[in-house]
Image: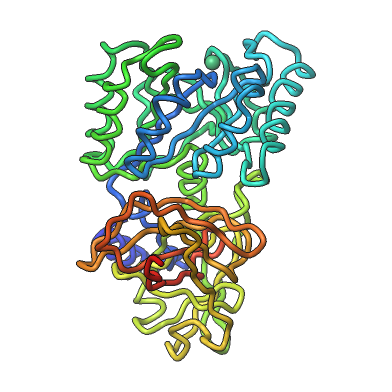
Amino acid sequence: MKPNDRLAKANLLLLLGASVWASPVTTVPWNGHKGAVTFTFDDGCPTQLTNVLPALKARGQTATFFLIGNSAFTGKQAEWKAAALAGHELGNHTTLHDQLNSLDSAKITAEIRDQALALRAVDPAVEAVTLAYPYCGTNDLVNRIANRENIIARTCGGDGLFAWNSKPTEWMSMTSFILQDDASVPAALTQIDKAAADNSWLVTLNHGIGGDWNYIGTAQAISMFDRAVAAKVWVSTYQNVAAYWRASKTMDTVTARQTSTGWDLAWTSPHPRMPRSVRLRIKLDTATFGSTAQLGQNGTPIARESDGSYVIDFMKLALSVSRTSSRSTRNHQETRPSIVRTSNHGDLRIDGIDDGLYSCAFVKADGSRSAEAIVLARGRSATIATADITGRTSMLELRSSANPADHWLFRLPSVR
Ligand SMILES: [Zn+2]
C-alpha cells in the first residue's frame, strides 16, 4: 500500500465511523523491490549444477531446485548440499516423479512426505517446504495432501505472475511460466519486465540449461538472470518469496494492543510448515505510533533502516513498540563478535556468533556494497571466502537471517 492509499483508507474509515481500523503495520512489498522473480529448475538435471549455479553465484542470486529421489539427487548429495548452504533452495519434486493425480491417497502421501524427509536429511538448513508437481498434475485430493508438508506448491501454465495485492485462493496450485526451448526465452524476458512494471511476482520453470532435456542455452538462461538484475526485482527462492508473501497477508491485518509503555502486537503463523525464520520488512503507521517509537522483538531492539522500514522475524510471532527511542542501539555490554584472517589469500572467519544462516556483504571505501552472499555459522563461527573482493574493500557487513536485528560491521584485518 502506498502512503497515499493508507491515508485514503484511514480517512475512509474515519468517515464511516467504523470501529475497525487499518492495521498499524504494513509489509513493504517484495522486500523493498518493485516486483520479484523466482527461477525454478526441475528434476535435478546435471547441467543445473554445472551451468546454472556458477552464473547465479556471479550475480549474487539464489534459485530453487526441485529434486526427485533419483540418482541426479542421491548421487550428487554433496553438490546439492553445497548449493543449499550457499542460499539456494532444495524443493520437493516427489520421490518417483509419478503423476500424483492418478495415485491413491496413501501413495500421494508417501511420494510427497518421503522426498521431503530425504531433502531435510541433507542438512538442517534444508527445510523442504515447497513442492513442484511432476507433470504439473494435481487435483483437490493432491492439494490437500501437499498442504501437510508445504506452504506453497507449483503447477504450470498461465503467465506465472502474481500481483502483490492479490491473494491466492489455492496456495497448493500456483502457476508458473514454462521455458521449453530457446524460442520461449524472449517471452520470459518480457515477463521479468512485467513483474517489475506491475509489482508482481514471476515464477519461471526450467529443466536443463545448455543440455539435458527441455533445455534452453546457457547464454539464454544468463540473459534472464541479467534481465532480473536490470529490472531491479527481488530475485529469491520459491520458499523465501512465498513465505514473505504469506506472512504479509497475516502481518497486514494485525492489530496493536496498548500497554503501559507502548503497544504489543501478536499474531499466529499462517501455516504449520512456515520456515523457521521469515525476514519481513515492515513499516509502522506514524499516526498510531508517533515518529520516535522503538520497535523490538523478544526484548531486542530492532534498528530502523534508512528507508524508515524495520526488518523483523515474522516467526517470532510478536513485536512490541515502545513510545520512547531511548534504547535505539543494541546493548554494547554484550560480547562483540571478532573477525580474523585465516589465510594469506585473506579468507575470513567471524567468531562469537550464534549458529545459523547469515547474509554478508562487503562495503567498499566509496560506500558501495557487493551483492549479499549467504554463509552458515557452525560452532559459533562462520568462514567467508574472499577470493573475489578487491583491495578497495574496507568493511564487512554481517546480518543474521534468524534475527535481522543482529548485524555487525567489521573493519577488515589486513592481509599478513
Ligand atoms: Zn519434473
Image quadrant where residue 355 sits: bottom right
x and y percent of residue 284 in the render?
39, 70
x and y percent of residue 219 in the render?
27, 22
Residue 252 appears in the figure: no
**Residue drawn 28% across the image and 56% down it:** 390
Residue 255 appears in the figure: yes
x and y percent of residue 168 in the render?
47, 35
- Taking the image in four quarters, ligand 1 sits in the one at top right
**Residue drawn 68% across the image and 38% down it:** 120
Q: Is residue 135 left or right of residue 395?
A: right
Q: Is residue 239 above or below residue 411?
A: above
x and y percent of residue 88 in the render?
49, 39
Quadrant in the picture for the C terminus: bottom left
Colour approach in the figure:
rainbow
**Residue drawn 20% across the image and 67% down it:** 366
Which residue is nearer to you in this view: 152 or 9? 152
Quadrant in the picture for the N terminus: bottom left
Which residue is nearer to you in this view: 198 or 298? 298
Q: Is residue 183 above or below residue 346?
A: above
Q: Is residue 9 left or right of residue 272?
A: left
Image quadrant where residue 226 sits: top left
**Residue drawn 30% across the image and 33% down it:** 225
